[in-house]
Image: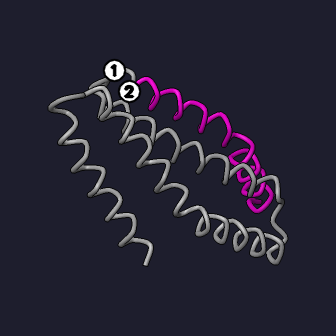
């Protein structure tokens, strides 16, 4: 059960952060960052399985692989930006966190334009 490992790592990191903030608060952000990376490494196997499943489903459904790659990139951007936003908020930098959110949303919208235009073309073909 990976969730038990993830929760255990998070709780240990939380205790270390609480203890370190009293004496060396600058190290708390490093522990938080290291914990996030460690958790991402733990779930990487699951992520690879999900990507492989989506790829096989896209092949069976004859979906253009370009769209699948775009969707995976958009999902990756969303996860990474959320991770960065959380780190910024934990550091007390809410202003930087909000700029990351805005920037990532703009990038996601710009990357999704080919998918949206393709869907609109399909809808226009279906309509009389």
x, y percentage for residue 29?
Answer: 34, 33
Report whether 70 appears left or right of 46. right
User: Which quarter of the rendering shows the C terminus?
Assistant: bottom right
Residue at the farthest left position: 22
Q: Is residue 29 left or right of residue 99?
A: left
Give the magenta part as a residue range.
99-128
Near mark 2 (Cα within 10 A), the count class, few <14, some 14-19 or many ≥20, is: some
Is the residue under label 2 in contact with that under label 1 (CB below 8 Å)? yes
Q: Secondary structure at mark 2?
A: helix
- Relative to 99, 118 lies left or right: right
- Quarter of the image holding residue 67? bottom right
Q: Position of residue 72 (x, y in %)?
A: 67, 53
On whether residue 125 falls in the magenta region, the answer is yes
Quarter occupied by residue 110: top right
Quarter holding the N terminus?
bottom left
**Which residue position holds label 2?**
98
User: Measured along the vertical axis of the image, is residue 10 above or below residue 105?
Assistant: below
Residue at image mark 1: 95
């Amino acid at each position: 059960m990976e969730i038990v490992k993830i929760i255990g790592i998070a709780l240990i990191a939380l205790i270390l952060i609480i203890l370190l903030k009293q004496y060396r608060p600058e190290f708390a952000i490093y522990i938080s960052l290291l914990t996030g990376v460690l958790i991402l490494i733990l779930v990487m196997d699951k992520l690879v399985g999900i990507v492989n499943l989506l790829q096989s489903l896209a092949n069976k459904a004859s979906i253009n692989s370009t769209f699948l790659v775009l969707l995976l990139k958009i999902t990756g951007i969303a996860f990474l930006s959320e991770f960065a936003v959380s780190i910024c908020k934990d550091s007390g930098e809410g202003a930087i966190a909000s700029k990351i959110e805005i920037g990532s949303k703009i990038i996601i919208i710009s990357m999704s334009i080919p998918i949206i235009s393709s869907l609109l073309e399909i809808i226009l073909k279906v309509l009389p």
